[in-house]
Amino acid sequence: MVDYTVLLQQVINGVSLGAMYALLAIGFTLVYGILELINFAHFNVFMIGSFFGMWALEALGLSGQSQVLTGLALAGALAFAFAIAMLGSGVLGVAIERIALRPLRGIPGTTGMITTIGVSYILFNVILLAAGADAKNFPNPLPTRRWQVAGAVIDLREVLIWGIALVLMVGLQLFVSRTRLGKAMRATAQDAEAARMMGVDVDRVVVAAFFLGSALAGAAALIFGLYYNYTSFLIGYTAGLRAFTAAVLGGIGSVTGAMVGGLIIGLIETLGGQLIAVRWTDVIIFSILVLVLVFVPSGLFGRAAPTKS
Amino acid sequence: MSEQVEEKAGGVVPPATHARALPALRGLATPPMRAAGIALVLLAAVLFPPLIHNDGDIDAMANALSFAALALGLNIVVGFAGLLDLGYAAFFAIGAYAYGALASWQLHPAWSGFWQPFAWLGLVAQVNGSVHFQVSFWLMLPIAAAIAATFGILFGAPTLRLKGDYLAIVTLGFGEIVPIVARNWPTVTNGAQGLNGVLPPQLFGYDFGVSATPYYYVGLALVAFLMFASQRLKVSRVGRAWMAIREDEIAAAAMGVNRVRYKLLAFAIGAAFAGATGTLYVAKLQTATPEMFMFPVSVMILVMVVFGGMGNVWGVVVGALILQLLQSWFLQDLSGWVNAFGRLVDIGWLQHVQLVSSIELIFGIILVVMMLYRREGLIPATRRVAALSLEQQSAAVARGGFAGLESLGGVDERCAGPLLDIDNLTVRFGGLVALRGVSLAVPAYGVVAVIGPNGSGKSTLFNAVTGLVRSDDGQIHFAGRQITGRPPHVVLERGIARTFQNIRLFPNLTVMENVLIGMHARLHTGALGALVRLPPTAREERAARERAIEILAVFGNRLLPRVDHVVSSLSYANRRRVEIARALASRPRLLLLDEPTAGMNPAETLELADQIKSLARRGLSIVLIEHKLDVVVNLAETVVVLDHGEKIAEGSPAAVRQDPEVIRAYLGRSAAVL
């Protein structure tokens, strides 16, 4: 007998995780859409983003989960932490593009992807050496406030995560559809050569894609910290691969697809863990990754199929 | 211009005997200096344990050899075939668990009569009423290789249609799934704790036990064998097919390489290397845990291949040994020195820093630095060749067509009816109709030119005939046999070879290799044949190389001095010539030339037009797409005009020129009225 209250609770949890994966997936999709590059460094930009967020909260004198803030103080602390995590990650993403990836642009094949694996390894080990291997207690100033919905519990934390994710995603959609740079990004994603000839500064577009994607990864990373109350040098790989699966599922290159895909992966993670077994969650998610790539390579919303022409 | 050209006519065609001295023909035999070098390295490797006499160092070396074997396997997949595999450790795991489960106490079903035959064979024993698996290590080496190869095909098959980075992601997915399954399947693998008490190998009653030296020798023998196998495969028809796929998949298929077969073969052989190595590794450690086969291991093997030089057999072995020994010797020593220095100067963190744990940082830096500054690795796969002398560089422009064409052969077979018969061919790309009901017959010995404005469907016609695009309607018959919808390599085998509008050679391969790949469909050596290389195989290879030289010789001294040059270093016109030579190498009956003179100067155009004419005289049927109308008029008996995917005219060059439809298509309606 399935307990529907438990399932509802898992749906709530899944939406929160899904929001995080969606923000992370957007980074993969933006860069892929423009450069056709799978950016493994994104995994650990996310991981470092969580450290930026943690350091920002610690700089405010917060530590652990016992120091609770409310009202304006809470809003200010969170805004500061998000700003630092997003800015730090964004700058890191741009630096990676500038130093390691731009010299390789235009070289066909898997060179770029191999380089991003190398960059990811460097980021991972720099944090391992600098911060140590132990899991860090992530400061969480949110007060405990809960609402009962049909037997399930919605925490203030969840509401906050949903709200922030929604604001960021709507903001991104507006940016991409309304601003000059956003239009240039879409044009470059369609046809980089044509965009260049029409006067689009492709370098600027690439930088924008890396900055936005990495900044959203920073936001996802702070959400990770607030959700799980810890961070460590290890968090990038699992979360990154799941978010990547989300991007592929939604159709890589499509921002809407990344959002929907993220939500689906979040729900699969919590409901799959509930209905099947947590130890098989990864197998389920990787099987989805493989099956989607092999059978529906353009995903739910994708236009460019990642198969050979 | 043309007068100047005429003066030099009578061309320079080096005799084929001269060609024998060219290095391309030496490819098969190992030069003596190299053989001596290999013997020296082998001697040093054999003498290493008694000379070093330190079990820890021998142990490190034995482990390093295992990773060298893994790097060799990944090199087949990534270096030769160009298929980036990010989950290669999965095959290592499969080989390891195959031996681990069949040579330990892990599986112990109740004893029954069923097991008796296996007990007689010595594979199992009855212990306290249950079965104890004790399959011999030596037997398991090939069995584990075969099991891993099976999984290689299984995991490879879904990736066949995917392009590079997506293929990598799928392999990464499998690479993740295998260790998780190992962790969650305790009956066979004992889960996260890992297998215990895996039996050490025995040889003539000698038990290998835990001493490193015997494992070192087995590892050395394995690496030596795998290097030998890799090298043999590399210089064979099989290796060339892999490299062709790596360089340009479409062109490889169009030149007769069965992509599905050769990709799966690369996955299978690469996996087999890992399977055998897994068996050795587990026998040495006598345990296997899922952590030994996770993503970082796959990346480490990739770093070894990238560092050493993708595609270079010695390179990847050296890369693997350096990185492993860096890890187990140098970083440990360095940590010791730094710690001692820390104690000396009394700085706390210096006394405790462990540099071994930073090996992954070093891997990351190696990957990035190699990609940015030295993508070809420590030891590049293609060696540079000496620059040409001034005399060799000066091309003698030859008019009058090919000399020495007798060597082409195999083109004068007769058939009833048209050689190529295209009937009502329609190709759609989404809403766009690229070809609409086009019919076309090419008679044997005929030269047909296809002309038409840009975007009129000329190249699509070639692509449909050669199987590169699927036709939506209509039939294509070649020499009386249906070829509609057949894959490109089958079309080539039947006798249709082509060139591409924007030249699709295999850019990082030599002229010789490019031409040899053209012969792929006419040669027979398989993987096993290449490995054993019995006299018939060696003869076939030698004959193929000699024939390649003969084919190249028809271009005078344009290509002969450059046989060992990488084609990307050639001039544009020479690349066009290599592409034609490659097509001729497949012994075609019909040659499809897509704008063969594009980008050539007038003299070169005349030269090539003559050469095409002489091909036709030799009995080769030709369809050519051409924009230069003088070339068309000079060569073609029949001209077919396409416009917007439809055939608007067909006839002799003179008749087509007058056709109002044609004039309208080229110049617009008002011109036609005038």
Image (cartoon, rainbow, N blue to C red):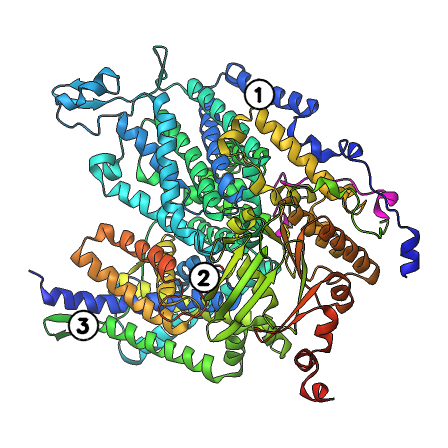
**Eyeballing the image, is B361 above or below A189?**
above
Mark carried by residue B317: none
Is residue B66 shown in magenta?
no
Where's residue B28, x and y in %?
64, 29
Depth order, front residue of B422/B584: B422
Decide if residue B437 is on the left or right side of residue B629.
Answer: left
Query: Residue beneath label 1, please?
Result: B42
Depth order, front residue of B650/A260: B650
Select label 3 or label 1 by which is in front.
Answer: 1
Where's residue B121, x and y in %?
26, 17
Where's residue B41, x and y in %?
60, 22
Q: Amino acid at mark 2?
A: Pro
Query: Residue beneath label 2, please?
Result: A306
Where's residue A96, x and y in %?
53, 60
Depth order, front residue of B94/A138: B94
Span colored in magenta? B372-394
Q: Residues within 10 Å of mark 3 (few under 14, many from 20)?
A: some
Residue B211 visible in image: yes
Instruction: Identify the residue at horizontal 29%, vertical 53% (top origin).
Output: A282
Instruction: Identify the residue at horizontal 52%, vertical 36% (top origin).
Output: B323
Q: Quadrant of the C terminus of chain B?
A: bottom right
Q: Chain of mark 2?
A: A
Question: In the image, are marks 2 and 3 on the same chain?
Answer: yes
Q: Amino acid at mark 1?
A: Leu
Q: Nearer the N terminus, badge 2 or badge 3?
A: 3
| Residue farthest to the top, as pictured | B205
Query: Residue beneath label 3, please?
Result: A154
How many numbered callouts? 3
